Image (cartoon, grey):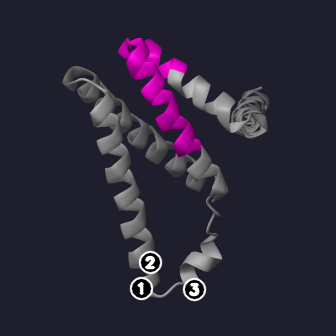
């Protein structure tokens, strides 16, 4: 009886883990099907709800989000193999470019948002990065 219960518990755990992974890929597929304008609108609406944006801020955030979505979709993804083959100077340039883009984006958001909204925005970005690291760690464990 104990063995049967143990086997049932292991199978249930495996099924629940598999379902969790499938859910995230469905969401990514759904988002890939949306146009740039639709994605920018969704992101702007979320920010409007979270930060209580004015009409002027909403319009500015929409144009900013649209620009960010276009940049993100146009970027080519660098595979792990390509990254390993890069020289240290190329890696340095890539990292510098990414950091420069993040700094510029933060400045653009700061120009639109108030100080209080910007504090909330930064807190949410910290939380997103933290959760992203947790998900990445979880994926590494699942692959092993």
- Percent across and percent down for residue 84 are 55, 81
Q: Considering only order in the chain, which callout, 3 or 2, is on the residue closer to the N terminus?
A: 3
Image position of 58 (left or right of 83): left
Front residue of this view, candidates 133 and 121 = 121
Give the residue at mark 1: 88
Front residue of this view, candidates 5 and 24 = 24
Front residue of this view, candidates 119 and 35 = 35
Give the residue at mark 2: 91
Determine contact: label 2, label 3, CB under 8 Å: no
Residue 48 lies in quadrant: top left
Tell me if residue 43 is in the magenta stretch. Answer: no
Residue at (57% x, 55% y) in the render: 140
> Between marks 2 and 3, how big is the CA–CA gap?
10 Å
Residue at (41% x, 43% y) in the render: 129
Determine contact: label 2, label 1, CB under 8 Å: yes
Residue 108 lies in quadrant: top left
> Between marks 3 and 1, how big is the CA–CA gap?
9 Å
Give the residue at mark 3: 85
Image position of 46 (left or right of 52): right
Where the C terminus falls, by quadrant? bottom right
């Amino acid at each position: 009886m104990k063995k049967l219960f143990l086997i049932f518990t292991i199978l249930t755990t495996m099924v629940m883990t598999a379902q969790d992974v499938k859910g995230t890929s469905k969401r990514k597929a759904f988002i890939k099907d949306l146009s740039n304008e639709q994605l920018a609108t969704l992101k702007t609406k979320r920010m409007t709800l979270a930060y209580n944006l004015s009409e002027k801020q909403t319009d500015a955030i929409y144009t900013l989000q649209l620009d960010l979505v276009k940049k993100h979709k146009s970027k080519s993804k660098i595979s792990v193999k390509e990254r390993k083959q890069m020289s240290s100077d190329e890696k340095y340039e890539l990292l510098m470019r990414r950091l420069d883009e993040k700094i510029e984006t933060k400045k653009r958001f700061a120009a639109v948002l108030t100080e209080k909204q910007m504090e909330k925005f930064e807190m949410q970005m910290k939380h997103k990065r933290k959760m992203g690291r947790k998900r990445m760690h979880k994926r590494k464990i699942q692959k092993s």
